[in-house]
Amino acid sequence: MNSLEIRQKFFDFFSKFQHTIVPSSSLIPAQDPTLLFANAGMNQFKDCFLGKENRSYKRAVTIQKCIRAGGKHNDLENVGFTKRHLTFFEMMGNFSFGDYFKKEAISFAWDFLTKEIGLDSEKLYASVFREDQEAYDIWLKSIGLPSNRIIKLGEADNFWQMGDTGPCGPCSEIYFDRGLSFGCKKEDCLPGCSCDRFLEIWNLVFMQFDRQPNGKDILLSQTGVDTGMGLERLMVVVQNKDSVYETDIFAPLLAGIEELSGVSYDQAPQDIKTAFCVLADHIRSASFAIADGCMPSNEGRGYVLRKIIRRAALFSQKISDKNIFPELIQFLVLSMGKIYPELIAQQKLIIALLENETEKFALNLIHGQELLKKYVKESVDQRTLSGENAFKLYDTYGFPIEITKVIVQESNYTVDIPGFEKQMEIQRAQSGKKQKAVFAALPSNIITLFTGYTELITEAKIIALLVDNELVDQVEKNKTCWVITDKSPFYVECGGQVSDQAKIFINTVPAAVNNLKKIDKAIAAEIITPFQICIGDTVMQSVDSQSRIDSMKNHTATHLLQAALVSVFGKSIKQAGSLVVPDYLRFDFSYHESITAEQLMAIELIVNQKIRENIITEITTTTYNNAIGQGVTAFFGDKYNPDNVRVVTIPGFSAELCGGTHVRATGDIGCFKIIEFSSLSVGVKRIVALTGQKAIELYLESFALSKHLSQEFKVKPNFVFDAVKKLKDQTKMLQFEVKALKKELLQSQIPSLIQNIPLIGSLPLLIHTFSTATLEELKEIAGDLIKRKSGFYLLFGGQGEKLFCFGLVSADCKISFSLQDFSLFLSEQYSFKGGTNKNSFYGSCRKINQELIRDWFLKNNN
């Protein structure tokens, strides 16, 4: 069976048992700061396990895109050197949210592997958490697995947690015995051994706890099941292969590398095969990450992506002198484009980013490797590269520590990782980056009803107070605290729209809201209390109406802009970030080609046309799948409830999932004007625009300026640009003529200077001042002089407040002093700033005393 058939069998099997098929979520976690990338199938169901979200189904089945290359789960360094580790993989999983638990989960897994796939049951083993007797008994009594094939292991192997915090619980893993030829040859080898004999293919996690920031595990409100089976590992067993890279999943990529490089994988030595595997894996992780909206950067998930690309660049050198890595996308698209159409849509962007990143790193790679070899030679006795040197490579040449480790391992060296981390900590401390406050989970009954869609003033009751992240019953006067009410009109920053400017009135006395946060299902407002406040007090909450209205105009205009971009450039346009504030809007998007001024004008015209049409904005709710099926746009990084999403529609033009606030009709926006366009990086563009009153003010200012210039130049307003350009060209020509005349004047002085060069000792020395000469002109004059006659030429000039000095000595002139000594003399006498090389020096000085300079020459030159 091939991988496509296995995919279908998996979905069909669990569909028979009332599991809803849920598409893979984006690799970019939705508003989850605990994760860099989706690293397990359960990520998109996290709130279901926490009891914060209810869906229309209790059972689900998915095949989830995953990346494990940073944070707690990081397989980057192992990729290429083992037969099973990958940075990108597909996680097959079935899930239960308060429905079935351990017995059914184990039965489903056993039946799928033995009956649907046809694996030999005699080769299957199971491990359980040492304290989970219930799971052990199910395997022994319900499934009938012999006790010698049920292994109890510790927390490191059989207790699963998604991150440092969040849902977790004991797990049971299923292993396939590949035989003694794959293992460590020990007769008593069992699952848990680090050899390749027992291949873990399925992990059944029984969600029972929620791990807190302090490390404490508290019981979840309902139990759940989260299972994960790597498709790539399963194919190793099904197709009886030695490695994941030998399955049908990787075959097109390995063949593509062979085609591009001319190197045969089967006939290559092991180090080249390793490079093949690295490229095959890394093109998948890099391409899928970019397709889902991740861009290379120097922090967070963007830096993980950059590390993957740079590691690929290193291993690509081992196979070919050509930069073949970006070209591999074509083979990935052919093999996986039908399953994941985002690869097809973003193919050009992926190529552009990969080419830019690999080419930019190529030069650094050469210089960094040379420096690394030097460091390795210096540490020959210890055979350890110091953490300080490893950090220099990272800081100077952008070498991720993973790349440094790979290179030094080839010389049987190691890296002082603790020393490297120490240097990193010093840098972080010096950068002064502030950590965002993390709030503990609130009791489930603390919920705020958002009223801001329909009103800007809301009377509400205080239901919770937070001081220093602790719940309290009351807060004294003049204290900073977070106030949580049962209702609130305050919009909290989300989807690019910034938080409201607002006040809370306590006994009619206003308290400015300094910050707003969404904590679980509650809206918290930070204030300084004007009086003592208590749980149960009634307060009045008020949003600044003008700032909210301006934000609404900019937010709806952002939707129009997004739709206009798609209409001009096509559906490959993908949002890469946005900011909606009262004063302006900013929209970042991915697009691989250059954009002209004419295209920007076309976008402006489209948006303003839709504003003039005064289209009524429609806001509805539906299911996520129904919305996507109707072509509604959703954005990476935004979190959506699958059973209840809010759709903002501008009929006939735009439809997006959005929780923000919007105008009643497009005409309320007034007008739209792009004020800035830039390229943030390869493939990422930025538009900044104004709407409403701000745009009108800009138009008025621009008109007034245009009118003034038209009167000044005595031309019609539409010819102002031509008049300015003509004046600019005339000025440029006059400057050129002045420069030519000045050069001619300076050159005319050379013959007389040549005839009157005095000798200082045996050295011909000319000291001369050209009062208005620039440094470049001094250099040119000195060059002409030295071509005509050997000697030492010391020339001074000035330009405005600046004074310049340039010296040039003939190679055949003998001087008994060093130019460094002369430079030092000038620096002492004239505040000279500069340096010397073999034949010349230059700098600036405050005053000039030619006699003093000649005296120094007489004293120091024989």
Image (spheres, rainbow, N blue to C red):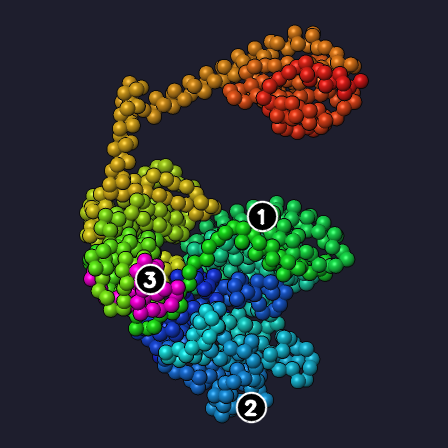
Q: Which residue is mark 2?
A: 146
Write the residue at 42% across / 60% down. Answer: 437
Q: Nearer the viewer, residue 660 or 440?
A: 440
**352 magenta-colored:** no
Q: Which residue is mark 1?
A: 361
Q: Whole-Å distance between the Cαs marked 1 and 3?
A: 47 Å
Residue 406 occupies quadrant: bottom right
- Give the secondary structure at mark 3: strand
Q: Position of residue 496 (x, y in %)?
A: 34, 53
Badge 1, how many Cα within 10 Å: few under 14, some, many 20+? many
**Pointers 2 and 1 in contact (CB under 8 A)?**
no
Q: Position of residue 551 (x, y in %)?
A: 28, 49
Q: Nearer the viewer, residue 625 or 307?
A: 307
Q: Whole-Å distance between the Cαs marked 2 and 1?
A: 55 Å
Q: Nearer the viewer, residue 813 or 227?
A: 813
Write the residue at 66% across / 29% down. Answer: 835
Does residue 726 appear to the left or right of 366 in the view shown? left
> Where does the magenta region start and end?
457-484
Q: Nearer the viewer, residue 643 or 702?
A: 702
**Pointers 1 and 3 in contact (CB under 8 A)?**
no
Q: Which residue is mark 3?
A: 482
